[in-house]
Image (tube, helix red, strand yellow):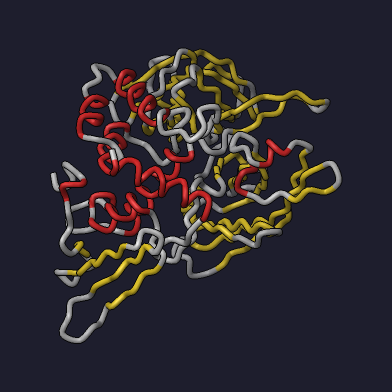
Amino acid sequence: MKRIFVIIFLLGNYLLAQVESSRGENVIVSQAFFVDFANYVDTTPAKTRLDVFIQVPYSNIQFVKQNNNFSANYNLSLIFYDKDKKNILFERIWKEKVVTDKFQHTISKDNFNISYKTFDFTPGEYLLTCILEDADSRKSYSKDYLIKINYISDTLGISDIIFVKDIVKDPDGKKIVPNVSRTVTNKTKSLPFYFEVYSAKDREINLEYIIEDLKNNTSIVQKDTYKIKTGTNAIYYTIENTDFKLGDYNLKINVTDAEHNILLSTEKKLYSIITGIPSTIVDLNKAIDQMIYIATPNEIDFIKSGNTYEEKLNRFLAFWEKKKPNPNMEENPILEEYYRRVEYANKNFKGWGREGWRSDMGMIYITFGPPSYVERHPLEPNSRPYEIWDYYELNRSFIFVDQTGFGDYRLINPDYSRWPGYRQ
């Protein structure tokens, strides 16, 4: 019980103090922004139209109170390179401003702003760098994307898929709110999406919709017949009676003829998360294994012994519900911080044949959080590389030695009895 209490206590301290990470990096608890792309037929010959959507959650930008409102300003940059990132082809930079009259909106992950830009491209592969810079905090986030631009025929062609979050009607007609993050949850019971079919003549086509569970090799198939007209045909469709579990999925759309031969095909991945848990958790069984630094072996065995996926999930959620510092809160900062540390450990402390969360550095980082100070000795004479992690508030230090010379740091004189099952 003492071990569990120490972890929870330190998690609470970290949330208040926001100590710098042990690698001196600024770790983001949630993704700073989401980007999605779609190819469409272009009016310019030999070109393809590329639509770029950027979704920025309100919780990831800084709002400033002005009179009775709260406003946030940020800059977005799209830099297009050739495939090898040797040459800049062009860039687009613009400013965005968000205003709300409710403070709760400013800290909500469910509220967001979507930006949309369109470009004409010669088919091929390109590299895109997207940069978000908060105008007030001056924090900047960047991510690269490899983009494949396909040629789409207007004789008979199909666009990319855009998942739909909502459909709104305005004086100009029906407009979609795209699901840029491409995420669904275990509570999602239908999957709406949008795509276009192009044809040089009026005709009847068969459409086949397939949702593939990439982990369990199962699928949902629905079919429809559609009479398309000459030109562009905008199609909104919803697959009903979905049952998403944690993991990755793929939506495939096939256009077939009367003999069910595939004429055209397009597909896009989507990601299922569980309501109330971090989006970094993509495998429930692994997330349960990663609880060894906060749960007892009996607690982990109880969760794993659930007879069904739903029973395991409910036991997992019940465990973390007890760790909430405030039962009335919707979010669970203890859960969020624990798996943030797991994600950080996986990225920074990989060892020989082990994921970062199972390494010695990962064990200490997940349990105690970022150290107050790190003393590194990578090139000490007559000594193997080593690091000393100091935790001032605990009056404790941990020494890690790279025994192999390949970055596989091991803890000196560890007491593995505190983490049963760690070396399994």
- Looking at the rendered structure, the number of numbered marks drawn on it comes to 0
Residue at the extreme bottom: 381
Image quadrant where one finds the N terminus:
top left
In the depicted view, which residue is nearer to us: 202 or 136? Answer: 136
Query: Is residue 64 toward the left or the right of residue 406 in the image?
Result: right
Query: Is residue 424 toward the left or the right of residue 407 in the image?
Result: left
Q: Residue at image x 77%, y 44%?
A: 70
Query: Is residue 313 toward the left or the right of residue 299 in the image?
Result: right
Residue 409 visible in the snapshot: yes
Q: Identify whether 299 is placed above or below 68.
A: above
Q: Where is residue 89 in the image (x, y as percent from the top left)?
A: 58, 64
**Hey, which quadrant is residue 301 in on the image?**
top left
Q: Residue at image x 79%, y 26%?
A: 170
Q: Identify whether 417 is placed above or below 178.
A: below
Q: Identify whether 48 is placed above or below 401.
A: above
Q: Where is residue 178 in the image (x, y as percent from the top left)?
A: 61, 33
Image quadrant where one finds the C terminus:
top left
Residue 157 visible in the snapshot: no
**Hey, which quadrant is residue 59 in on the image?**
top right
Query: Is residue 105 toward the left or the right of residue 127 in the image?
Result: right
In the depicted view, which residue is nearer to us: 208 or 94? Answer: 94
Q: Position of residue 196 (x, y in %)?
A: 59, 29
Q: Residue at image x 72%, y 56%?
A: 94
